[in-house]
Amino acid sequence: MYKENCIFCKIASGEIPSKFIFENDNIVAFNDINPKAPTHILVIPKKHYENLDDIDDIDLMAEMLCAIKEITKKHDIKHYQVVTNNGKGAGQEVFHLHFHIMAQKKID
Ligand code: AMP
């Protein structure tokens, strides 16, 4: 599912060119444009879901967590935060589900 005017749908589809840190059939990851930590990566499903409330695909959720583990392992990041802001009141600004990976260790 692709939502018109969704910036992350455009990134996931390649409409907005972006350097992917990770990609498989269902997920992409890329650097946050406004990093709040030396490493700040966003992991998103290619399909459009607004946030955690909107997703009931357990397999995809598990796959996203596995992708986070794969990304951190590949870059030897051992200490990191995984955050998702669910809803405006929690600070969600982009309404396409994403997990933030934030770490003090900088990756190339
Ligand atoms: P949230 O507040 O949880 O919705 O986080 C949205 C995040 O997306 C913020 O950290 C933004 O800096 C980031 N962001 C917004 N637009 C882009 C973009 N075009 N490329 C990469 N990151 C973006």
Image (tube, rainbow, N blue to C red):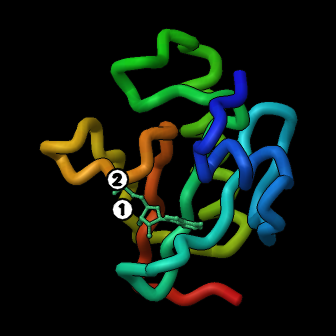
Q: What's the amino acid at mark 1?
A: Gln
In which image quadrant can residue 11 be found? Answer: bottom right
Q: Earlier in the sequence, mark 1 or mark 2?
A: 1
Q: Determine whether the residue tagged by mark 1 lies in a helix, strand or loop.
A: strand
Q: Are marks 1 and 2 in contact (CB under 8 Å)?
A: no
| Up/down of 95 relative to 68, above or below | above
Q: Position of residue 103 (x, y in %)?
A: 43, 76
Q: Determine whether the residue tagged by mark 2 lies in a helix, strand or loop.
A: loop
Which disc is residue 81 wearing?
1
| The CB of the residue at mark 2 lies under 8 Å from ligand 1 | yes
Kindly give the residue lying farthest to the left in the view shown: 89
| Up/down of 106 relative to 63, above or below | below
Q: Residues within 10 Å of mark 2 (few under 14, many from 20)?
A: few
Q: Position of residue 50 (x, y in %)?
A: 45, 30
The residue that appears at 78% across and 61% down in the rendered structure is 16
Quadrant position of the N terminus in the picture: top right
Q: Label 2, on which residue?
A: 93
